[in-house]
Amino acid sequence: MVVSTLTTTTFSSCFPFSKYIPAHSKSSGAHPRTLCCSSGDEDLNGLINVSSLSESERREGAQIVESSDGKRCIQSSNGELPAKNSEIWQLFNEAQQNILYLDKQRALAIEELNKAISEKNLLLEKIKELELEKQAMDGKDQASICWQLLLRIDSMVLTGMISSEEASKMRRLVMDHKVSIVDAFTDILQKKDAEVLAELRQFSYRSKKSGFHIVHICTEMAPIASFGAVASFVTGLSQALQRKGHLVEVILPKYGSMNLNEVQGLREIEVEYYSYFNGQLHGNKIWTGVVRGIGVTFIQPLYYSSFFNREKAHGYSDDFERFMYFSRASLDYIVKSGKKPDVLHIHNWQTALIGPLFWDIFVQQGLEGSRILFTCHDIYAQSLVQPEKIALCGLDPARLHRPDRLQDSSNTHLANTMKGGIVYSNKVVIMSSTHSKGRIIHSLSHGLETTLNMHKEKLLVAPYGFDSSAWDPQKDKILPENYSADDMKGKAVCKIALQKKLGLAENSSFITVGCFLSDLSDVDTENLREIVQNATKMGVQFIFMTTGEVTSRHKELESLQVKIEDENVRFINRYDETLSHLIFGGSDIILCYSLHDPILQVPMKAMRYGAAPIAITTNNNNGLRHFPDHDYETTKLAMFINSTFGYLSFSQALDEINNNPSEWNHKVLDAMTKDFSWDAECCDIHISAYTAINSL
């Protein structure tokens, strides 16, 4: 039985079919059993030889007999066939069938393989032909696109858009970077000269260097610590910069009230780290994580643990001490970590003293290649303190309390923290979506006119932006139907959906007005009431939505709601993100408390959604208008929004819709095609500033 066991095991492990189980058992009858084989080789091809008996078979009385059909058989003396011979027969018969099956499969496999090899050779020949054709076409496309760019550069010189010197540099840029130029400008024919020029300049920045390493040192960042304009700016600009190939990171205080659910991979760094404050070194914990794709470092004081472990981020009597500690700790951390950023980007008075700290203490500690960019979001908040307080972070009050440094121009006995940021930075960017550089210096400087005039050569003005990936009617998944400037049918669908949701009369021809009011809005509610009541008599529909937490300001709006009580007016006394998209999508006009809206970016979102932003203020029924400022240092956004919508009062806007609809529609569609996102003008201005200070 050894043969049976070995044979069965071998076949079962080698072939892809079920193991054979012999179907034999002891006979209960007395009939003789015979093992027969042909005299030839037709059954087993001569594999079994039965011409002789084994010794054991002879002892058992077995004999060879021949049947009537010529087959020779082994027959036992008692007529029973030995069981082992029956098993051998069955196993060899199975083996024969398996061998025949495998032989057939092998032949089929060889046939399939030869077919595949033939097809592969044909495919390789076809690929070679296509590659040769592609190379020929690529050469033509590359030359065509490069020439289109060169000719467009000629056009820009002739129209006065660029100087001959800049044109010469751009031509050299095109010729030196043909391959990458082709990849970047494949759709050049569809773009205007201004767009091509902006992209060429941006390409020039990228071609000089792989990207800047920028470190924002700030006290806010959306969505984890949103308290004002800085929060959305830092996140929006950082994401835009990273999309353009720059490395951006952020350093923040670790607030106790921070929304850490938005931080990916938050972890504490096990490192011994001390910073200087008030004459001593103090320990800090360092945490790191990622917020919206941006690397963030959080600084947590140990000894001064109460500095940031509070309900609010600011608004305390010791705010100066808190943020001076953070500013000095941030620089100590950068040196400790061995970072060598190209740019230290600081914001508002809270981190303004990083400027003098850098130049007086840290520049010789491995940061010789770094430069300072100061962005001012709120020029009114300047933080005036006793000069001796600046010694807390290691600065010398006697050296800095001078008219050309930190001494305040009006209150000469005090130090002006924001002034320190302006004086000690390589570039200063003032954020304004509506005002020119000249107007900011001479009319909106809040006591810093002398300082800004002295440093006006390094002063830039930049607009805010918005997140175009979340606010785009062409892709917005919240809207019932998408639309664009090329196809506005979905706009009417959105209006009907908005009217239906809020229980307003459903008619796409009705003028619908949306209005978002925040805690920071400075709106004369009596003036607003008069505007609404006059317009509702003409069938205009109004939708008001408040933003932020419920405050006394919201109670005023509730009182306004009671005074109006009109079937064409709806108030939503809470912020609803989903409904806000529908309000933008379904409105013809968005009333704004100002066209400069750094927190909600309502005017820019309105234009993207085909709704006209119209400002309302406290001066009179029509409000203070924003007329175009022809100062040559005005942002594109300011020039466009002021010249298109800024000069219109609400009543004038209604008149134009009703009496000159073609002109109105032209304005709305033109605004929809403009890109005022973070990736556009705001990012470009900051990159130009980074480029300028890195060449110093």
Image (cartoon, grey):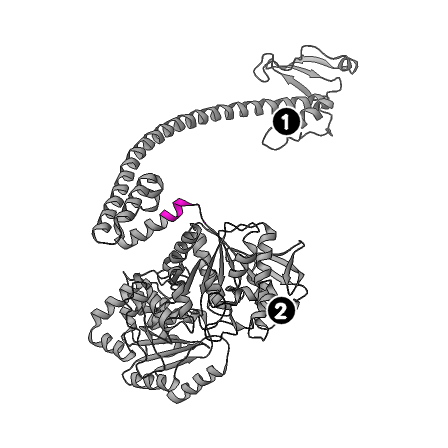
User: Dominant secondary structure of the magenta stretch?
Assistant: helix
Residue 616 falls in image quadrant? bottom left
Q: Residue at x 59, y 53 (%)?
A: 335
Can residue 265 be seen from the camera position used here? no
Residue type at the position of mark 2: Phe
Write down the residue under mark 1: 11
Secondary structure under tag 2 reads: helix
Taking the image as shown, residue 479 lies to the left or right of residue 320, namely left
Q: Secondary structure at mark 1?
A: helix
Magenta-drawn segment: 204-211
In depth, the one of 77 and 373 nearer the eye is: 373
Magenta stretch encompasses residue 194: no
Residue 360 lies in quadrant = bottom right
Viewer-nearest of discs 1 and 2: 2
Instruction: Calculate the distance from the C-alpha at mark 1 to the C-alpha at mark 2.
Output: 79 Å
Looking at this rendering, what residue extends furthest in the bottom direction? 563
Residue occupying image coordinates x 63% and y 27%: 11
305 over 568 or under it: above or below: above
Image coords of residue 261 (percent x, y): 57, 63
